[in-house]
Amino acid sequence: MHSFAYKNSALHCEAVNLSDIASAMGTPTFVYSRKTIMDDLSELKEALAPLDAHIAYAVKACSNMAILNLMAKQGVGFDIVSGGELWRVIHAGGDPTRCTYAGVGKTEAEIRYALNHKIYCFNCESENELREINRIAGEMGVKAPVAVRVNPNVEANTHKYITTGTKENKFGVDFSRIEELYATIAAEMPHLYIRGLQMHIGSQLTEVSPFVKAIEKVAPMARKFKELYNIEFWSIGGGIGIIYDGCLASGSAEWWTAHPEQITLKSYAEAIIPLLQPIGLKILVEPGRRLVGNAACLLTTCLYEKKGEAKTFKMIDAGMNDIIRPALYEGYHEIWPVKEHKNDTIVADIVGPICESGDFQAQNREIADVKPGEILAEMSAGAYGFSMASTYNSRPLAAEVLVDGDKWHVIRKRQTMAQMVEDESLPE
Ligand code: LLP
C-alpha cells in the first residue's frame, strides 16, 4: 500500500507536503516514497516465505542509484538487461553474483563484463546467444552459468507491447524446442553449465490466472531439468500489476477490501506456492513495476488552459519525454491537484509541451479544474517513468526526490542545459 494521501487538503507523500517539494525543486520532479517500497518489499518477502524464494528486482523499472542501493540493503538481487544496468547495480552497492542477465541482444563486451563480475546467471533467449556465450567463456577460460528463457505461449491479458510469452513475441525459446536445446547445451557447449530455467510472460498482469497457467505448463519441464541437469533455480519472471485507475484511493486499506478482484502480493503468492513448493527448486521472482510503480508520482505544473471547439486542454510542463507510458501503451495515470479541489471537475485532455499529438498524459479525463500555476501529481509514476525518459525536444531530464518520513533527499538533480549537450561536439 502506498503512502500518498491528502492531509488538510494538501497532497502528501508520507509526512511531506508535495507543494514544498515542488517549490524547492521546481517541476517536473519525480517523488518516491521510501516507506512504500520498503513495505511492499517486506510484504512480498513474507508472502513468499514458504518457498526458497529470491527476489531479483528488475532494474529497468527504475534504475536510480538510490533506489538500487535501497534494494541492495534489503538483500535483494537484481534482474538486469544490459551492461549499463550491471554497472549501476555494482556502483549502487549491489552484489553482481546475485544478478541474472536477461535480454535478446547481449553484446560480446557485455557478456565479458558480466563474466568478469561472476554474475549468477545468463538468462538466454536463443541457441545462437548460447553459442556466443560458450565461445567467449571458452576464450576467458571460465564456465558461464546459463538458463534458457522458455516461451510458454500463454496469453497474459495485458497490453500487446508488454506481452512477452506468446509465439508472436521475440522473447524466449519455443516451449516445444526447449528440451532439445538443453540437450544441445549439455552435449556441445563445454564452457557453459546449466544453472536454471527462466520464463516471463508479460508485464502489468492484473490477475493471477496467467501466472498459474504458465507455471502449470512449465512445471513438468522444471522437474525434468532438475533430474537431468541438476538445475538449481527456476525464475518465474516478473509481471505483477499495480493500480493505475484507483491509485490514490488504493492508499487505504478500505479500498483493498472493496476490490477483492485486484491482484495482491498475497493472492499471487498463495496461487503459486502450492505449484512451486513440491518441485524443490530455488524460485526467483523478478518484480519491477510492483516494487516501485505505486511508490512515486510525477509533480508537474499546469501552464495554460485552452478551450477548443471540441475539447478543453490543460497544458502541463511534463511531456512524453518524462513519462512515455500514455503515448506508448495507452497507459492510464491518475492526475490529482496537490492542493485539493472540491466539486469543480471538468473533462479535459492533459497535454504536454512536446510537438506531437501523441504527447498527452490523459485524454477526455474528468479532473479537477486546475488553473495555470497549480501543481499536479501524476500517480503510479515510479515504474517505467524516469527510466524511459529522454531529452526529446531538448528538454533536460527531470529531477528525482526520495521521501523518508518527514525528510526528503534529492536523488537526482535536474539536468542542466549544459549537461544535456556536454557530449556533443562540432566537427573540426
Ligand atoms: N523480467 C523480465 C525478463 C522482463 O522482461 C521484465 C519486464 C521484468 C522481469 C519485470 O516486469 P515487471 O515486474 O516490471 O512487470 N515499459 C513497459 C513495461 C516493460 C516491461 C519489460 N519487461 C511499461 O511501462 O508498461
Image (spheres, rainbow, N blue to C red):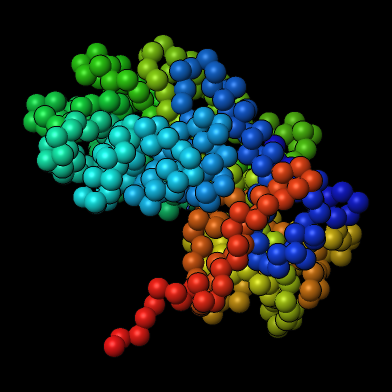
Q: Residue at x 72, y 76 (%)?
A: 303
State the image coordinates of residue 178 (x, y, percent, origin top left).
22, 31
Seen from the viewer's position, the closer of residues 265 and 284 is 284
Ligand 1 quadrant assignment: top left
Seen from the viewer's position, the closer of residues 366 and 203 is 203
Q: Residue at x 20, y 27 (%)?
A: 193
State the image coordinates of residue 99 (x, y, percent, origin top left).
38, 36
Q: Residue at x 79, y 46 (%)?
A: 406
State the image coordinates of residue 82 (x, y, percent, origin top left).
35, 49
Seen from the viewer's position, the closer of residues 120 and 339 is 120
Residue 79 is left or right of residue 184, and the answer is right
**Image quadrant where residue 338 sits:** bottom right
**Image quadrant where residue 216 sits:** top left
Is residue 172 shown to the viewer in this render? no
Q: Residue at x 77, y 56 (%)?
A: 18
Of the 4 image quadrants, the one containing the C terminus is bottom left
Residue 185 is left or right of residue 389, and the answer is left
Q: Reply above or below: 127 against 318.
A: above
Of the 4 image quadrants, the one containing the N terminus is top right
Is residue 162 shown to the viewer in this render? yes
Q: Reply above or below: 174 against 395.
A: above
Q: How many marks?
A: 0
State the image coordinates of residue 362 (x, y, percent, origin top left).
64, 64
Q: Reply above or below: 398 against 31.
A: below
Q: Reply above or below: 196 against 310.
A: above
The residue at the far left in this view is 188
